[in-house]
Amino acid sequence: MNRRAFGVTAALLGTCSIHAAPASAASCDALTKLALPNAAVTASVMVPAGTFTISGGGRGAAQQYAKLPAFCRALVTSRPSRDSDIKIEVWLPAAAWNGKFQAIGQGGLAGSIPYSELAEALANGYATAGTDTGHVGGNADFMPAHPEKLVDFAYRSIHEMAVTGRAVVNGYYGSAPTWSYFNGCSGGGRHGLTSAQRYPDDFHGILAGASTWNQARLDAARIAVNLTVNRTPESKIPVSKYPMIHDAVLQACDGLDGITDGVLENPTKCTFDYAALACKGADGPRCLTAPQIDSAKVLTSALKDPATGAVLFEGAHLWPGGELEWATLGGPEPLVNSLARVRNFHLKDPNWEFRLANIAADIERATRMDNGLVASNNFNLKPFIDRGGKLLMYHGWGDPQVPAQNSVIYYDNVLKTVGKAAEHSVALFMIPGMLHCSGGPGTDTFDKMGAISQWVEQGRKPERIIASHLTSGQVDKTRPLCPFGQVAKYNGTGRTNEAASFSCVAEPMNVIRR
């Protein structure tokens, strides 16, 4: 994984061939004798094709697991500190290994192994690994009393997974993976950025979706938005009004991209004024009261100090076209994970009560007390770029949980900090209509690993990525995803639900709203 070795490998190998079944596959159980730094393989077993099961996965997961090929399942415990207890699983194809390693990230508060994502990577020929990030259960109860576990959760567990995962791959196959990748969204996307920042030698290629970098400020700001929208009973926007608001926004802005399809290709161009929906008299289902109009503006503008009007955070507002999902930030209660992290992680006080009058102070205090653990705000990716690393970021414009401009702000700062070299090694794709990591009316399904592996292994930076929208498992629309600063424009001829009828063209995007 050193820079020289990576350069030589990249020069000699254009693509990775399928590897034959390893001679050591029959001795999967021997991995328990493997010597690992700070870690041990506690169990390893061959899993015959179609027999893997795990409780709690549901019918869809069971169907996914039933299609898996035979693999060696290695359970690892890593203890880089006295209080660390990081669980890692490494899955190794018994046959047809593609010679690559894919580490999986996960969002929220983690606390479990991401089995479904491991299964997807394995099915595609990867040796793959996932981690619980150092604690059990998707909660923050461990945080106040365990500073070392906080470090594990923040970033160290991903590094341990990368180092241990490759060592297990090497021990099983007798050769190291030719290419190593990280694939994560939301909190997993933040872990991807952190890996590029803190451990530039861990991965050749990193997929980082909807990254929650600047986590402490983001969490506190999302709580503040919720408090502001719910400041009085009159200011709350009933969920029943969301479709009415959404329809009005689409009527005003859907045609700006050349076709009307329920998706805003460039929501930054939409300047819909919610005051146009003002009630002429009494409150009703087809209008907004004055307090509700103010709340709509809070949800779609930069967060401001209610006392001074000063901007507190530019990354907490939502974009036009996503009105049906406003309840995520504007519902009766703040996001559960945001409350848990700010109380237990950043403020170290599980009983902290948030009040509107203290918004500005709480945001600054949470950011300061985080002390950079989950900030992931180092924009100097030059060490990662210098060794040939590639970072592919993506984010849905309709994300109701991690507003889309967060990825744009990070990407823009990397370009400003690193300079021209970053343009060849870092890419950002914004996805019209996609919600948090997936879902929504946009084309949210695309070959992420295909895009990043082609870039890393063949030097072909993606200029457009074909994505699909599925209904009941069937593709009903395809569309090109374009690099940030470009949008998909209809060519004027051809079917409007086919990607071939669209071209990526440059268009200004103003992501900062006041």
Image (cartoon, grey):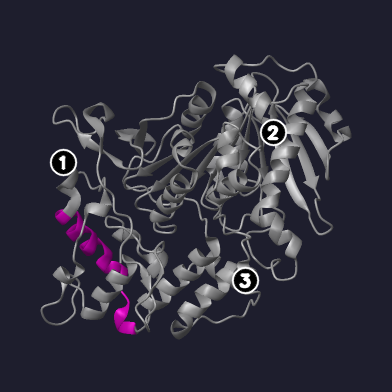
Residue beneath the point at 62% across and 74% down: 347
Q: Position of residue 301 (x, y in %)?
A: 32, 66
Q: Position of residue 199 (x, y in %)?
A: 66, 43
Q: Judge by depth and name the residue closer to the eye, 379 or 267.
A: 379
- 37 up-or-down from 407: above or below: above
The residue range painted magenta reads 233-252
- Asked if residue 461 lies left or right of residue 33, the reply is left
On-image quarter of the C terminus: bottom left
Q: Which mark is residue 181?
A: none
For the residues marked 2 and 3, what is the alpha-carbon distance in whole angstroms?
A: 37 Å
- Label 2 packing within 10 angstroms: few (<14), some (14-19), many (20+): many
The amino acid on which the numbered mark 1 sits, given as a three-letter code, is Gly
Q: What residue is shown with label 2?
A: 91
Residue beneath the point at 50% across and 70% down: 220
- Asked if residue 308 lies left or right of residue 373, the reply is left
Number of marks in picture: 3
Residue beneath the point at 52% across and 56% down: 213
Q: What residue is shown with label 3?
A: 369
Q: Main secondary structure of the magenta part?
A: helix
Return the disc, 1 or 2, that comes first in the chain's sequence. 2
Task: Give SS at disc 2.
Answer: strand
Q: Position of residue 293 (x, y in %)?
A: 24, 74
Return the disc, 2 or 3, that comes first in the chain's sequence. 2
Q: What residue is shown with label 1?
A: 258
- 4 up-or-down from 317: above or below: above
Task: Give SS at disc 3.
Answer: helix
The amino acid on which the numbered mark 3 sits, given as a three-letter code, is Met
The amino acid on which the numbered mark 2 sits, given as a three-letter code, is Trp
Return the disc, 3 or 1, that comes first in the chain's sequence. 1
Residue 115: which quarter of the image?
A: top right
Q: Are marks 3 and 1 in contact (CB under 8 Å)?
A: no
- 339 up-or-down from 87: above or below: below
